[in-house]
Amino acid sequence: MTRVVTIGIVVGALVAGLLVVPVLRPAELQVRADELYVKTAARKRSNDARMGPRRAPPTPAAKPAQPAEKPVEKVEADVSTRSVEVTTGFTGHEILVFGAIDNSQEPEGETGYYDMVVVVEGTPFPLVVRRKSDVAGVWINTSSMTFASVPSYYAIASNRPIEEIAGPKVLERHAIGFAHIKMTPAPGYQFNYTEYELAAFKAAVIRLKQKEKLYVVEAKNGVTFTGRSLFRATIPLPANVPVGPLVARTYLFRNGEVLSAHIARVNLERAGVERVLHNFAFRWPFVYGVFAVVLAVASGLLASAYFRRQSA
Amino acid sequence: MNIYLPIAEMSVNIAVFLGMGCAVGFLSGLFGVGGGFLLTPLLIFMGVPSAVAVGTGSMNIIATSVSGAIAQYRRKNVDIKMGIVLVAGGVVGSAIGVSMVKILRQIGQFDLFVALSYVTFLGAVGGLMLIESISAIRRARSGTAPTARKTGQHSWVHGLPFKMRFHRSKLYISAVPPALIGAFVGIMAALMGVGGGFVMVPAMIYLLRVPTSVVIGTSLFQIVFVMAATTLLQAIQNKTVDVVLALLLIIGGVIGAQGGVMAGARLKGEQLRFLLAALVLLVCLRIGWDLVTKPAEIYSIGPLIGSSTP
């Protein structure tokens, strides 16, 4: 009877695991559809609210006398790793985007004269968003929206919140900010839904991608300045980042306008055993399947033989 | 320590997945089932895409069952002829199931279908087993001998054609019911990532009246071959078999299974069935709860299946 109890405990522990695991998931990130829908209005309000305590920009009179031909600021940037390898040991990677502002007109270092935004965007992929509803007491996927292309990954780093840096029109033009991520509906799909429903689907993509840590925002000290012209930003690539080339865009802002921009590329590729296995599975699925079966049988038999010798 | 899975495309903790494999392996050895009905939901809860959980689960079941099947074969507990009929049906069912996985994923109803299948089968089988085992335990306590199998008892099963003699099962019955049971289990294998022992074992005992002594051995025999076919088909059609994930689960699983077989040999049949029934019902309730409560997030995102993605 004690054995029954022992087994009962093992069974109980397993079931407890089954019940507890979902609870351990990270807390939900709050982005609602209507937030995105009324983004323009909301942004305007928050902009006005934040403008108050901000230090007034230096007046033109305070500037040192300029030579007749004013040199133009130009941003030059690069990334610490041009190529990130996804190997069996891949647990994510942090890329460093760094660079300098040529012809910086900032009178002194780190006075907040310029604003800097770094956007790292992953390869766009087609994506399906599904919405559940209650059908006779069971929650079932009842509607879906297909986007022909959605960035697999999207990270923003800036020296202060982007809403404070520039207005929505400028941000939209450069696809800066979650609200301005380019999501192209698949042909035919945009006519199936109202504008509000479309906004809700887009908001869901952003919310779920944030939950997976694939859409990230580093608004506070995401970009740090050193002296009058050097800057750096670290961008975290999580372990689940979809493989494919990444584009790092760097924008230099002054008074809400883009002065200069720079584009750098990062390769994100499978490597080593990881690459071999993935190619194997997708290019020779039959051989891979046979390999999987043989591997399973062999490991089972090996274990069986091993334990038989142990008990003999 | 973490490892990146090539097909699931996620980084997982090695120790957690080894431990999961070990715990499920223990139970699979104990009850003579593949353990897939525990493993697949566990993998899905851990964030493994459900199609990958199902595809990889079948590979894991091969490994945990093959050692068990051999152990049973040595003890002459396998009816090979019955097993072959079950496998033939199973492979056909598996092919149907794998195609269904593809269609269901395209229309976005795969997760729902998996959950509904789990609730239905686990609920029905667990409920029946619970009732049966409780009455068996009561009988054992009150001292009355269990009713022996009545030989020569006839039912509709005996009226079907293609009669075959199954020596080890001491049966002379039509090959149609075992083939149908096999096919049904094959479909379940592909859709749910389970070995199907929890359906096959009661079906063999109650429908075919196979002696209990050969039931576990024969079902393990069928599971090994049908899961091999399922693994191959999933790899070809759905590309959802992750060998790295499977290897982690297998290593844990074979160790656990040894302990389970030893523990199982020392337990009474009705006690085993009671524990298994309780476990099955708990898993069923857990999955059913998620279906009927309003999810915290009603939206979900996934890749476009069946498109030519770069």
Image: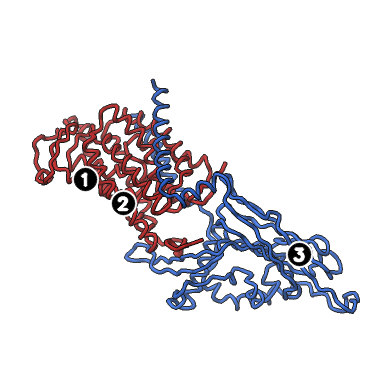
Chain colours: A blue, B red
Residue annotated with mark 1? B179
10 Å crowding of disc 2: few (<14), some (14-19), many (20+) = many
Distance of label 3 from label 1 (alpha carbons) = 71 Å
Task: Tell me which label, 1 or 2, sits earlier in the chain.
Answer: 2
Q: Secondary structure at mark 3?
A: strand
Q: Secondary structure at mark 2?
A: helix
Tell me which corner region of the image, top left, top right, bottom left or bottom right, holds residue A46: bottom right
Task: Identify the image quadrant of the N terminus of chain B.
Answer: top right
Q: Position of residue A180 (x, y in %)?
A: 59, 72
Q: Position of residue B217 (x, y in %)?
A: 27, 34
Residue annotated with mark 3? A76
Distance of label 1 from label 2 (alpha carbons) = 14 Å
Instruction: Check the residue under mark 3 and report the chain it is in.
Output: A
Which of B81 and B256 lies nearest the eye of the viewer? B81
Q: Which mark is residue B95?
A: 2
Give a yes or no on whether discs 2 and 3 share a subunit: no
Instruction: Check the residue under mark 2 and report the chain it is in.
Output: B
Q: Amino acid at mark 1?
A: Ala
Instruction: Check the residue under mark 1 and report the chain it is in.
Output: B
Tell me if label 3 and label 1 are in contact, CB under 8 Å: no
Q: Amino acid at mark 3?
A: Glu
10 Å crowding of disc 3: few (<14), some (14-19), many (20+) = many
Give a yes or no on whether discs 1 and 2 share a subunit: yes
Q: Secondary structure at mark 1?
A: helix
Tell me which corner region of the image, top left, top right, bottom left or bottom right, holds residue A292: top left
